[in-house]
């Protein structure tokens, strides 16, 4: 499978996000970082959420925007690289295309120039999380003992 | 008083069915009601977010420490409150054997009772939050509309629990009724008000307290409930405010009297119960008309400027979500929905704090025009 067809997963137990005013706000509940994505980055984030591959995203951008002075593929790869590095998305090479998806990105008669997506990272909540971490017990229920660990060794 | 010891009890070694949060809650509640039959309950009734709530305190200690913040919401008893909360402590009830899978870095109980890791548990019926160092446990049973706040010792209740009692329980309960607790202050009139949003040190409390005496009523300085709908309602939860005493004397000298009878809070701040001197200026809530993001500036006069809803969400959501666990995607969506419905302004706080209330009034006038 080529890199272009890789899809990405988002751990919804750890990552929450919302798109508002065309911007995406993403919060990593595990490490305290949070992010603001501008309009084009938010659009890409929305596509990643719905299971789109890089090739689909780049094609959609070419249909919708004037890319004469920009390289959308490099821009998309750079953004996704940051999202992977920051543990917001995880490559899922074996993921199939989700069923029922409409073709991405209707062609625009008047294309606006493509702007490279940008992301801002904020770390001011990290101290808060270090002082008051929240450990959420997952769906395995509780208690659960980590493999190889005896219950009495905990704590 | 310390946390219950970790033992090789069957509930820890893996009898998962016995150790579900709802099972644990049932066992805890049984212990509390049994002890209550022996020592009796002191009951207090309130209207919180417009709904009847009964606090059943085991003895006088929880009344003194955990009900003060609700003084402005006191109500007549009703036959069937929509939420009953048992306030108990380690002096009268021991917790059932502790089944949580504790993090490895768990500090000893009481080592720093204001901070430290939280363990959040849930199942289809129950939410629970254990503050390990502060040794307090909050649990709610959504099905029976009964909750428990247990603290290890009535003498050592963390200041956050005295200033903003039952915060987690009220947020979980609010989820059943279409509102959530957000990290914000709020002032307004019966026609409408504003949320003041920002992290610690942004000027929320200063701006809120600067409005006292202006005709804008106080609904909270650090946590309020906000509902859903076309015109979201703000519900006051607490009549407390917190400020560093030197800052209060310098910035708001006319409020210095609040320091009398104030209590020690966290990080050098003092905690005031505003019902003692300013009960006429306390609001139970109002329709939300705008969201303000205070910023301390070097200017003399306070001014406002419109910003995007996304800017508002960036200010409101992280600190709200990191304070309380549970349903965090839903809560983020709720905050975004609220911010789509009202304008968001930066409130540039001037050194002349008498200009804060007029600036807020101008925003309210614009929003309701």
Image: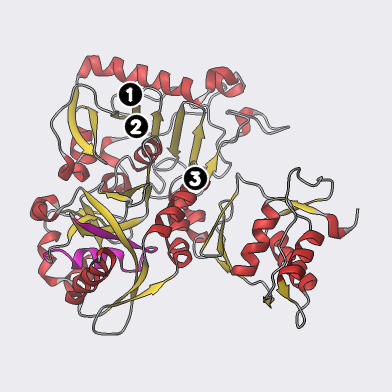
Q: Which residue is mark 1?
A: B93
Crowd rating for badge 3 (residues with CA inside 10 Å; few <14, some 14–19, many 20+)? some
Q: Nearer the viewer, mark 2 or mark 3?
A: 3
Say whether disc 2 or disc 3 marks the residue closer to the N-terminus. 2
Q: Are marks 1 and 3 on the same chain?
A: yes
Residue designated by label 2: B150
Q: Is residue A138 left or right of residue A77?
A: left
**Residue in front for this viewpoint, B82 or A129:** B82
- Location of residue B4 by image quarter: top left
Q: Secondary structure at mark 3?
A: helix
Chain hosting mark 1:
B
**How far apart in space, not on screen, are marks 1 and 3 (Cα)?**
35 Å
- Visible residue check, residue A87: no
Tags 2 and 3 on a common chain: yes
Residue B330: give its label. 3
In depth, the one of B109 and A100 nearer the eye is A100
Image coordinates for residue B63, horizontal then vertical, percent = 19, 35
Stretch in magenta: B191-213
Q: The N terminus of chain B appears in which quarter of the rendering?
A: top left
* Residue B27 quadrant: top left
Would you say the residues marked 2 and 1 are in contact, meaning their CB atoms lie under 8 Å apart?
Answer: yes
Q: Is residue B302 visible?
A: yes
Which element is circle 2 on?
strand
State which mark lies toward you, 1 or 3.
Answer: 3
How far is the residue under mark 2 from the one under mark 3?
27 Å
Q: Chain of mark 3?
A: B
């Amino acid at each position: 499978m080529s890199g272009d067809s890789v899809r990405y997963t988002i751990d919804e137990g750890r990552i929450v996000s919302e798109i508002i005013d065309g911007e995406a706000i993403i919060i990593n509940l595990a490490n305290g970082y949070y992010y603001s994505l501008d309009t084009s980055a938010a659009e890409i984030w929305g596509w990643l959420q719905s299971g789109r591959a890089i090739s689909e995203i780049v094609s959609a951008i070419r249909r919708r925007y004037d890319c004469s002075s920009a390289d959308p593929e490099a821009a998309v790869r750079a953004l996704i690289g940051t999202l992977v590095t920051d543990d917001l998305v995880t490559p899922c090479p074996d993921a199939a295309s989700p069923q029922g998806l409409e073709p991405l990105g209707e062609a625009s008669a008047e294309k606006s120039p493509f702007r490279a997506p940008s992301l801002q990272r904020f770390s001011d909540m990290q101290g808060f999380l270090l002082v008051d971490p929240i450990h959420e017990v997952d769906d395995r229920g509780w208690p659960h003992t980590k493999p190889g660990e005896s219950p009495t060794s905990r704590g | 008083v310390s946390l219950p010891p970790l033992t090789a009890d069957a509930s820890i070694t893996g009898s998962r069915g016995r150790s579900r949060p709802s099972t644990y809650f049932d066992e805890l509640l049984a212990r509390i009601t049994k002890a209550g039959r022996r020592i009796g309950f002191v009951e207090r009734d309130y209207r919180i977010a417009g709904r009847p709530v009964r606090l059943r305190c085991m003895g006088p200690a929880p009344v003194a420490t955990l009900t003060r913040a609700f003084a402005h919401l006191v109500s007549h008893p009703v036959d069937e409150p929509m939420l009953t909360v048992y306030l108990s402590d380690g002096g009268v009830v021991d917790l059932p054997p502790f089944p949580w899978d504790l993090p490895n870095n768990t500090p000893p109980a009481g080592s720093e009772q204001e901070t430290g890791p939280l363990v959040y548990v849930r199942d289809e019926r129950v939410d629970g939050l254990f503050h390990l160092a502060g040794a307090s446990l909050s649990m709610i049973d959504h099905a029976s509309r009964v909750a428990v706040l247990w603290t290890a010792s009535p003498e050592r209740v963390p200041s956050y629990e005295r200033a903003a009692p039952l915060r987690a329980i009220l947020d979980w309960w609010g989820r059943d009724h279409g509102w959530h607790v957000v990290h914000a202050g709020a002032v307004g009139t019966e026609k409408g008000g504003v949320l003041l949003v920002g992290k610690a040190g942004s000027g929320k409390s200063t701006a809120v307290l600067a409005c006292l005496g202006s005709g804008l009523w106080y609904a909270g300085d650090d946590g309020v409930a906000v509902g859903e709908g076309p015109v979201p309602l703000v519900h006051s939860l607490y009549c407390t405010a917190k400020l560093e005493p030197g800052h209060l004397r310098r910035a708001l000298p006319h409020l210095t009297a609040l320091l009398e009878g104030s209590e020690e809070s966290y990080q050098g701040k003092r905690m005031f119960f505003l019902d003692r001197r300013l009960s006429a200026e306390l609001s139970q809530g109002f329709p939300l008309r705008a969201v303000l993001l205070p910023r301390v500036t070097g200017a003399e006069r306070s001014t406002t400027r419109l910003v995007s809803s996304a800017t508002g969400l960036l200010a409101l959501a992280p600190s709200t979500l990191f304070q309380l666990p549970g349903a965090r995607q839903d809560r983020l969506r709720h905050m975004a929905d609220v911010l789509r419905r009202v304008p968001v302004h930066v409130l540039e706080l001037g050194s002349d704090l008498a200009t804060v209330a007029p600036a807020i009034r101008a925003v309210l006038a614009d929003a309701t025009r």
